[in-house]
Image: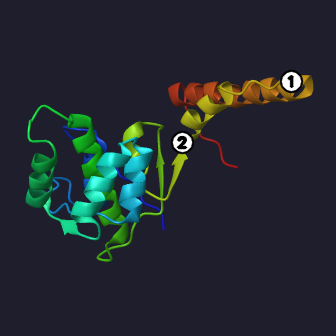
Amino acid sequence: MYYTAYFTTPRKDRLTVLDILRGDPDGESRSYYFNEEAFGMMAEFRLSKKLIDRLRDLISGKTLDESQMQELLETIYPTPDKGKNNRTRIMEAGAIAAYHQQTDFPVIPILLTDDAPQFKRLTYEQALCWVHDGRNYKKLHPVVPVHREKLEEFLGMYWNYYRKLLESKETPTFRRG
């Protein structure tokens, strides 16, 4: 089953997108679960091993609500203006792990998005809309001449099709196939 949704929210960060996927756009019932998935994600987010080990000792296997999460962050970072990025990454890792572990509703396995960072790691797989996917082909730099030619040919067709779509948007015609 496929579903499309469009939301405008005051914030467009990873936790907000996750709240929308959870059906809780205000984040009122957000929880945080700290398992190996969460700790692995923290490592991917480049939190220090020392910090991850400390968190593992404090909260491994635990689920926290929002107030407990804020207490934990205040314990780790008593000065409010310190560790802002780390605080966010800890919350994201725990919230994503909680979302993946919950069984109240199906976890979305794949999300079709643009390439914005807030969409990464929310689902097990991420697909890019084809226009954003096309940007990745521009990053290729083949060394073999025949591969270079094939890439140029492909990119020409790819972006030509895109231009035709834009034209058809400006002057739509209705044909039956």
Q: Residue furthest right?
A: 146
Considering the numbered disc 1 on the image, is that residue within a helix, a strand or a loop?
A: helix
Q: Which of marks 2 and 1 is nearer the N terminus?
A: 2
Q: Is residue 124 left or right of residue 65?
A: right
* Residue at the (11%, 52%) spot, across then down: 70
Image mark count: 2
Residue 144, x across and y down, in percent: 89, 26
The residue lying toward the viewer, choosing from 58 and 151, is: 58
The residue tagged 2 is 129
Q: Which mark is residue 149?
A: 1
Considering the numbered disc 2 on the image, is that residue within a helix, a strand or a loop?
A: loop
* Residue at the (59%, 37%) spot, across then down: 133
Q: Is residue 148 left or right of residue 137?
A: right
* Residue at the (91%, 27%) spot, across then down: 146
Q: In which quarter of the image is residue 175?
A: top right
Q: Mark 2, residues whose alpha carbon is within 10 Å: few (<14), some, or many (≥20)?
A: few
Q: Is residue 32 left or right of residue 44?
A: left
Q: Mark 1, residues whose alpha carbon is within 10 Å: few (<14), some, or many (≥20)?
A: few
Residue 105, x across and y down, in percent: 32, 74
